Image: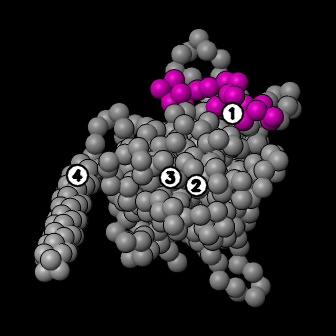
């Protein structure tokens, strides 16, 4: 039986088009002994998933598990694309909250990524397919028809072609989407339900920057924050979890969860995020340096191809212009010749 890490590395290398920034991803299964949870690398998969009596196949999903502090740290196009797909799904399903105006702007980049530059003859209201562009809950908050929402999205979509002279390919549009999404408070945060010593329910958020404690009705406004640079140690005993600050004068923060499994999952997310935090401050590894160099070379190659295509396009336009001008002069000459003969 394979361990989570062995299966993950083998499958990722074989089936995901050369994905090398594997440290951002993990395996998740809904058929675990504790519901939907991440597969632990160091344990055998068969010990973590629930095998039903009918022996139905267990589905393992490759998903983004850890997020960078800055999406510009992502190097590979395939990494950015997988991030884009997951973040878009989280926004549409309201796992990540986004205001209506931000949803419209993000949807315009979705169209840019899917269709390329705006074409007024093709991209009209009612002709964009059945793809969901705006979260349903957002649409229900306003007295606006589906067509009205589409028109607002198209208005933004049309401006992308007018505002920029750079090539607006899929990679560009998806990166713009991520840059905007990154500014949202809930972007890249994993939330866990906890209780303080008084038994009050709270949210614990774990992300690339640290830990955040928020009240139940306000996930976007942290009540207490522990940046990774200020955390000395994190541990749990049974259902009690303890955050020990670097400053010895600051009291340890303790909270409780409903079961040990949740504490294990919190610790796993803390360790993974802290490792990425430490890696960022130590400087790039040889692997990351190589990926950055490859990304730089790939960007240069694409730029060269774009410039070549643009040069060919302009040459064709110039040839067509000269042809039309020649035909116009020829018609003018023939008309003058006929007029002279008539005399």
Which badge, 1 or 3, is on the more N-terminal residue?
A: 3
- The mark tally for this picture is 4
Residue at horizontal 46%, vertical 38%? Answer: 69
Which badge, 2 or 1, is on the more N-terminal residue?
A: 2
Mark number, residue 296: 4
Which residue ends up furthest to the top in the rendered image? Answer: 249
Q: CA distance from mark 4 to mark 1?
A: 36 Å
Segment tinted magenta in the rendering: 212-233
Question: Looking at the image, is mark 2 or mark 4 nearer the viewer?
Answer: 2
Quarter of the view holding residue 57: bottom right
Quarter of the view holding residue 270: top right
Q: CA distance from mark 2 to mark 3?
A: 6 Å
Mark number, residue 158: 3
Residue under pointer 2: 154
Left of 180 or right of it: where is 278?
A: left
Quarter of the view holding residue 201: top right
Residue 152 visible at all? yes
**Tag 2–tag 4 contact (CB < 8 Å):** no
Which badge, 4 or 1, is on the more N-terminal residue?
A: 1
Which is nearer the eye, 243 or 35?
Answer: 35
**Tag 2–tag 3 contact (CB < 8 Å):** yes
Residue 137 visible at all? no
For mark 2, give the secondary structure: helix
Q: CA distance from mark 3 to mark 4?
A: 29 Å
């Amino acid at each position: 039986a394979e361990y989570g890490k062995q299966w993950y590395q083998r499958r990722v290398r074989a089936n995901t088009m050369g994905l090398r920034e594997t440290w951002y991803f993990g395996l998740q299964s809904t058929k675990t002994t504790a519901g939907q949870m991440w597969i632990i690398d160091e344990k055998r998969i068969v010990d973590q998933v629930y095998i039903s009596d009918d022996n139905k196949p267990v589905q393992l999903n490759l998903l983004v598990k850890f997020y960078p502090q800055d999406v510009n740290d992502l190097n590979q196009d395939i990494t950015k694309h997988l991030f884009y797909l997951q973040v878009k799904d989280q926004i549409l399903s309201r796992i990540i909250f986004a205001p209506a105006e931000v949803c419209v702007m993000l949807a315009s980049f979705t169209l840019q990524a899917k269709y390329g530059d705006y074409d007024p003859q093709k991209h009209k209201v009612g002709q964009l397919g059945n793809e969901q562009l705006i979260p349903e809950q957002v649409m229900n908050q306003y007295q606006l028809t589906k067509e009205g929402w589409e028109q607002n999205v198209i208005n933004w979509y049309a401006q992308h072609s007018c505002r920029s002279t750079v090539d607006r390919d899929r990679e560009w549009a998806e990166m713009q989407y991520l840059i905007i999404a990154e500014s949202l408070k809930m972007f890249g945060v994993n939330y866990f339900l906890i209780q303080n010593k008084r038994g009050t329910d709270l949210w614990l958020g774990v992300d690339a920057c640290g830990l955040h404690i928020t009240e139940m009705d306000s996930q976007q406004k942290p009540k207490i924050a522990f940046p990774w640079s200020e955390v000395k140690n994190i541990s749990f005993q049974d259902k009690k979890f303890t955050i020990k600050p670097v400053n010895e004068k600051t009291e340890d923060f303790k909270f409780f969860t409903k079961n040990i499994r949740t504490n294990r999952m919190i610790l796993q997310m803390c360790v993974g995020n802290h490792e990425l935090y430490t890696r960022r401050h130590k400087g790039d590894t040889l692997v990351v340096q190589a990926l950055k160099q490859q990304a730089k070379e790939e960007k240069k190659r694409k730029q060269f191809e774009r410039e070549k295509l643009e040069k060919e396009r302009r040459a064709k336009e110039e040839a067509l212009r000269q042809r039309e001008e020649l035909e116009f002069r020829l018609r003018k000459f023939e008309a003058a010749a006929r007029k002279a003969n008539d005399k």
